[in-house]
Image: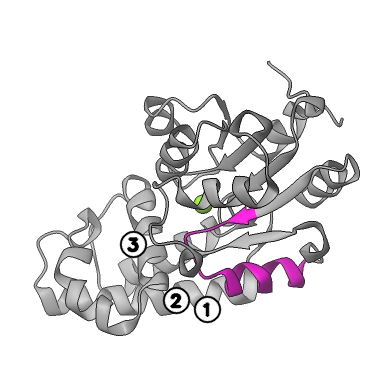
Amino acid sequence: MEKINLEKYKGIIFDMDGVIFNISEAIEKAVDDSVEKYEMNVNTDEIMEELAHLIEEIQNYPIPKILLNSYDLLQVRFLEGLSYFKKLRIAIFLFNQFNKYKDAESSIYTGIDELISKIYDKKLKLAILTNNKSQYAEEVLEKFNLNKFFSTIIGFNEVSEVKPSPEGIIKILDKWNIKPSEAIFIGDMTTDIEAGKSANVKMICVASGLAKKETLQEHNPDILVDNTEELINLFGFQ
Ligand SMILES: [Mg+2]
């Protein structure tokens, strides 16, 4: 497989959830709890990406916006065929369970901290670009002692358009005063691929479990790896 030559780059932008922080298990457990409690009949493999997006959106929006958009937000396959109020009840339960598991049990991917520290040692600039709150990213980084590596954190509150818009990436490149060709963006969702490609940076996608690999492939990232281990190998530190 192709290796990344870090000499060619000046900055690396990381997505948070699904690249550094592993929320797959929290989502899976929340889905399992909801399926059990509400006796739902669904194939959970099919719906993970959709629910990951839903959870991300619910986390971002202020309550009035969630309420005003709740009808559209709840148009997910997971809740298909249910009444609006049942959808709402299940979504709130799912979200609460997700937060519980995320705070108590979620961790960073094995080896990602070492990769970050090695890139930092090579004097590259590092940033986080998340569709979540930047404060959330800061808390996670602090919890796992990674905050010292990241000079820039951009969340949904720092941009007018979240990913798939390239705005966040462009903002970071401007701040660093570097060209798109000197930067890499690492994400795990189709929205990340779109943002990276529109910003003309090198786009590396990690199929970390929430989005299906075939779906990610269809969006043509520059490089698609199966997991964190492959991502680390790509940088040739092993
Ligand atoms: Mg992500």
**Left or right of 43: which side holds 26?**
right
Residue marked by disc 2:
97
x and y, in percent, of residue 55 in the image: 39, 65
Q: Does dot 2 land on a helix, a strand or a loop? A: helix
| Residue at 26%, 54% in the rendered image | 42
- Label 3 amino acid? Leu
Residue located at (88% from left, 39% from top): 122
Q: Are marks 1 and 2 in contact (CB under 8 Å)?
A: yes
Mark 3, residue position: 54
At 33% across and 62% down in the image, what residue appears? 54
Q: Secondary structure at mark 1?
A: helix
Q: Are marks 1 and 3 in contact (CB under 8 Å)?
A: no
> How far is disc 3 from disc 2 in space, using C-alphas?
14 Å
Q: Quadrant of the C terminus?
A: top right
Calculate the distance from the C-alpha at mark 1 to the C-alpha at mark 2.
Answer: 5 Å
Mark 1 residue CB less than 8 A from any atom of ligand 1: no
Q: Earlier in the sequence, mark 1 or mark 3?
A: 3
| Mark in the foreground, 1 or 3 | 3
Looking at the rendered image, the quarter that the N terminus falls into is top right
Q: Is the residue marked by circle 2 packed among few (<14), some (14-19), or many (20+) residues within 10 Å?
A: some
Q: Nearer the viewer, residue 9 or 142?
A: 9
